[in-house]
Image (cartoon, rainbow, N blue to C red):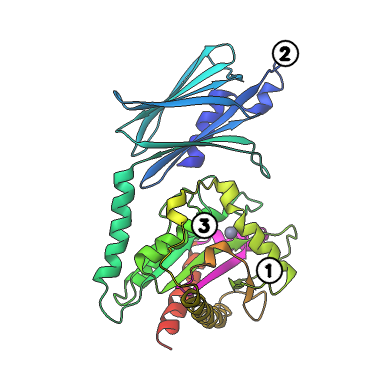
Amino acid sequence: MGTHFLKIVSLAFLGSSLLLLQPFSVLGAVITDVRLWSAPDHARVVLDLTEPAQYESFSQETPPQFHVVLTGTSLYTKKRELEVNDPFVTKLTVNELEKGKVKLILHQKKPLTVNVFALKPYQEKSYRLVIDLIDAAEEKKEQEERQKQKEIKPRGNKIVVIDPGHGGEDPGAVGQKKTMEKDIVLKVGEKVVRLLSQNTEIPAFLTRKGDYFIPLEERIKIAREYGADLFVSLHTDGSFNPQARGSSVYCLSLSGATDQAAKILADKENTSNILGGAFLRPAAYAKDPNLNQILLDLMQNNSMKESFRFAETILAEIKAINSVKHPSYRQANFIVLKAPDIPSVLLEMSYITNKEDERLLNDNDFQEKIAKTLNASIKKYFRP
Ligand SMILES: [Zn+2]
């Protein structure tokens, strides 16, 4: 949905490359792109800007709309309107009110809670203005549905949460043929959940069900709401060296990485929050004052020990279908693996930046093989 939309809107607004051909000088910020990402409980609209822009925003009740007025900003079209296929937003309109003043209107299907925040350039990303339109009732419903799974779980059953990395604004690693990590990990994640769900004793759920971004801390929160007994974050590796290949498995380290490469990888995976545009609502991540630190450390130690056991199980299984980069698991400070009470492992399935691996990662049979390997590893882990 997001990428498709991107193309349409890029044409509507004239890409930055075309702007270079304009004979007149450009003053202030220029909106070069607008993207929309649909999540089950919110819609995210992202504006790309050549410079930071001053903006004012306000909600209108009837009809429900959200207005953003950007000053010192230009648009090279007189008026634009865009219908979108989203659960919460029907269309976007952009008007140039006067020279250097642009008004964006988001036409909503119902009243929504809105968060607006600006992001600075980072790596290939330009200045961005992010508008999150949140359906608070739907957000609560999603949360309650997750918590219900924990309550209805029969004794002895285990819940697994599969976390397809990246999503939305954060594509993850990108292959030579433009294969995006976020798309591959979602496909494999869906296959793992389908396989595990055939076995009613190990119900499995995804943190992310589509192409949208979830902050790393929120992925842990989702797993905890499900009452997960195991958390698996799925990724594909990327390297400047096109020869690099193979699978690798990672666990959390609280005391520094096992090696420099593991540290670099964890740093890279942790930038997901910056690329994806994490807006941390403080209430969601505040520490529970009732939690005893000693108890928390004990839980964390036990979870990590269990993570190591699961990591070894995956490595033993995955060898049969792919080359393994390191004979053992590695450890580093991955934010997404920090649940104190859930054994958590991160799998780098293969290198998306290697030509042959990119082909395999796109191949349905190979995706199926990885999913089957994970399914077998998870079963072995719970029933050794
Ligand atoms: Zn990744």
**Side (left or right) of 313 relative to 265:** left
- SS label for mark 3: helix
Q: Are marks 2 and 3 in contact (CB under 8 Å)?
A: no
For disc 1, the marked residue is 262
Q: Residue at x 67, y 74 (%)?
A: 325
Above or below for 138 versus 308: above
Of the numbered discs in the image, which one, if any, rests on residue 23? 2
Q: Is residue 369 in view from this perspective? A: yes
Kindly identify the amino acid type of the residue bearing the numbered disc 3.
Leu
Q: Residue at x 56, y 51 (%)?
A: 273
Question: Which image quarter is the N terminus in?
Answer: top left
Viewer-proximal residue among 267 and 321: 267
Q: Residue furthest top?
A: 98
Viewer-proximal residue among 182 and 226: 226
Of the numbered discs in the image, which one, if any, rests on residue 66? none
Q: Residue at x 29, y 75 (%)?
A: 200
Q: Which quadrant does ligand 1 occupy? A: bottom right
Magenta residues span 340-363
- Indicate which label's residue lies in the foreground, 3 or 1: 3
Q: Residue at x 62, y 53 (%)?
A: 271
Q: Are marks 3 and 1 in contact (CB under 8 Å)?
A: no
Residue 275, percent from left and from top: 59, 47
Label 3 crowding class (10 Å Cα cut-off): few <14, some 14-19, many 20+?
many
Mark 2: C-beta under 8 Å from nearest atom of ligand 1? no
Marked residue nearer the N-terminal end (2 or 3): 2
Kindly identify the amino acid type of the residue bearing the numbered disc 2.
Pro
Q: Is residue 70 magenta?
A: no
For disc 3, the marked residue is 216
Question: Which image quarter is the C terminus in?
Answer: bottom left
